[in-house]
Image (spheres, helix red, strand yellow):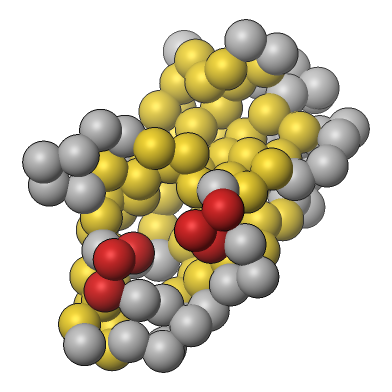
Amino acid sequence: QVQLVESGGGSVQAGESLRLSCVASGRIFSINTMGWYRQAPGHERELVATLPTNGTANYAESVKGRFAISRDSANTVTLQMSDLKPEDTAVYYCSLGGTYGPRHWGQGTQVTVSS
């Protein structure tokens, strides 16, 4: 069974930064894609950024230049968020999957940005 545990959410002012981290445990393929999605109230879950172990990062247009995704190993992923905006407020979910998209999700961590 795969488990994803996120950390690092919180409440900040616009323009500030936050760092989200996620650690996966269980049966994990060494080649995989980990990433971050978010869901704001009344909205569908949307991609923020993903990064394969053997590929390049993919970012949502709304976060390009402000967020950076990185990985230290096959079972960790970090999202550095800078210049946060109120519209970034959402529950952020860590994901783990492969070619066909996410298969596992974390429990979510709240990010709140006030103006």
Q: Position of residue 42 (x, y in %)?
A: 11, 41
Residue beneath the point at 68% across and 29% down:
33
Left or right of residue 76, residue 4 in this image: left
- Asked whether residue 86 appears in the rendered view, the answer is yes
The residue closer to the viewer here, 8 or 38, is 38
Q: Residue 30 vs residue 115: left or right?
A: right
Quadrant in which the C terminus appears: bottom left
Q: Residue furthest front?
A: 61
Residue 12, image x and y in percent? 29, 84
Please report the residue visible at 41 percent of the width from the left and 77 percent of the height from the top.
84
Residue, far left = 42
Residue at the farthest right position: 54
Residue 10 falls in image quadrant: bottom left
**Which percent across, then down, holds residue 73?**
77, 44
Above-or-below relation of 77 to 26: below
In this rendering, the answer to whether 69 lies above or below 42 is below
62 or 34: which is nearer to us? 62
Q: Position of residue 101 (x, y in %)?
A: 57, 17
Please report the residue visible at 77 percent of the width from the left and 52 percent of the height from the top. 72
- Identified at 28% across, 89% down, the residue is 13
* Tally of marks: 0
Quarter location, residue 39: top left
Side of 6 relative to 80 (left or right):
left
Query: Would residue 94 be visible to someone looking at this image?
Result: no
